[in-house]
Image: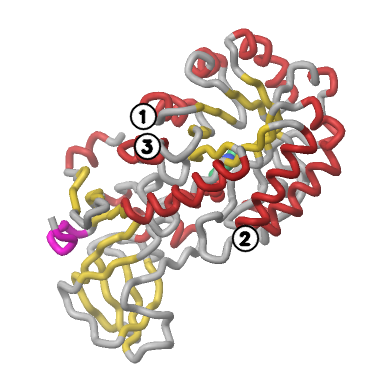
Amino acid sequence: MQESALPSPCYLMDQAKLKANLTILEAIRKKTGCKILFAQKAFSSFPFYTVISRYLDGAASCSAYEAELAHLYFHGENHVCQTAYLPEEIDTLLPICDHITFNSPQQFRQYSAKAAAHGCSVGLRINPEYLSQQLDEFDPCAPFSRLGTTAANFPEDCLPLIRGLHVHALYEQNSDALERLVHEVVEKFGKWLPNMRWLNLGGGHHITREGYQIDKLEAITEQLQQEYNLTVYYEPGEAIVWEAGYFITTVVDLIDNGMPIAILDASAVCHAPDITELRYRPPLIGADKPNVLPYRYRLGGRSCLPEDIFGDYSFDHPLQIGERLVFRDMAINTLTKAKMYTGVPMPAVAVREADGNCKILRSFTFSDYKNHF
Ligand SMILES: *Cc1c(COP(=O)(O)O)cnc(C)c1O
């Protein structure tokens, strides 16, 4: 069907953009010999796993459920790195994962021998205490972070069993941040790198974004692999679906409580919570920042929540009830975080295939709401 025939609200994934992103990542793998995994948390929609897995080496999971999903639908390596494992999860994970990373020396000591006996390559998550972000709250390497083992706590007695080190410290960053991160890792953990078979440099690399300096990432990768004779892994999540998703909404009401407000048939809180939780401001097709075009509106959701606001935008025409508004770059953390809080229905999920044809993959009803508990 045509895009205009899709229901509203609707998440729409774009296969052509997804494949364009994946092609960039595939070229890096081929050029450098590094391995790239799909970190699922930003977009754990299994119907897309087969196509994604064609271009990458495998999947990266941060929980047993993610690892099980990857095992079922993703072809390739299966890596897991969870902050803490429960004993019964270890029994689930060891038969389905080829790489398992532990967050602490304690968990490493508890489970690594069993993991190695299963043929898993065992790793330790390290914390280079390198601050790359503005807000400590979201930085995995901020002071007192629970994520990763600091150099001071490195368990040297475990060295014979540690096959790889894993570090995740970046968020939506370019390769200059990667360069600084690698510098810190080498400075603090470099003496142990010759013992490693792999070094996983985590996610947060915005490789598919315009302006990302891929040459620098490739040079850093080749240098590390040569110097330490190991395989470098990356596990981006956002970069894979960057700009590959749209969110179709419709204006259902117009009011003016001191400023023009359009109520949409969707909810920012329920359908794109990064907007209200992380102040993400998605681009909107045909609209601009609030003060650029003549008609300014606040776009609100139709839940009962006061904070349910998509944001302020400006348009070149007055909005009409029934008009469709389509947000861009809405694949990341939307479907994965969507909820039916306050009983707002879930949007449908659709895909635009490479030939332009759109297809509905899933729609939801009252019984999904009732049964989600
Ligand atoms: C979130 C996360 C990723 C993916 O990060 P993106 O920002 O989506 O690229 C990779 N590895 C770990 C350990 C993560 O927590």
- Image position of 370 with respect to 42: above or below: above
Percent from the top left, x then y, of residue 209? 51, 61
Q: Tell me which residue sits at (63%, 27%) in the image.
A: 101
- The first of marks 3 and 1 along the sequence is 3
Nearer to the camera, 29 or 258: 29
Q: What is the number of the mark on residue 49?
A: 3
Marks counted in the figure total 3
Q: For mark 2, what is the residue?
A: 213
Gap in angstroms between the C-alphas marked 3 and 1: 6 Å
Amino acid type of the residue tagged 3 in the rendering: Tyr
Amino acid type of the residue tagged 2 in the rendering: Gln
- The first of marks 2 and 3 along the sequence is 3
Q: Tell me which residue sits at (30%, 38%) in the image.
A: 47
Say whether marks 3 and 1 touch (CB < 8 Å): yes
Quadrant (top left, top right, bottom left, bottom right) of the N terminus = bottom left
- Image position of 85 with respect to 39: above or below: above
Q: For mark 1, what is the residue?
A: 73
Q: What element carries label 1?
A: helix
- The first of marks 2 and 1 along the sequence is 1
Q: Tell me which residue sits at (33%, 81%) in the image.
A: 297
The part of the chain drawn in magenta is: 2-8
Quadrant (top left, top right, bottom left, bottom right) of the C terminus = top left
The part of the image, by quadrant, that contains residue 282 is bottom left
Nearer to the camera, 267 or 327: 327
Q: Nearer the viewer, mark 2 or mark 1?
A: 2
Is 46 colored magenta in this rendering? no
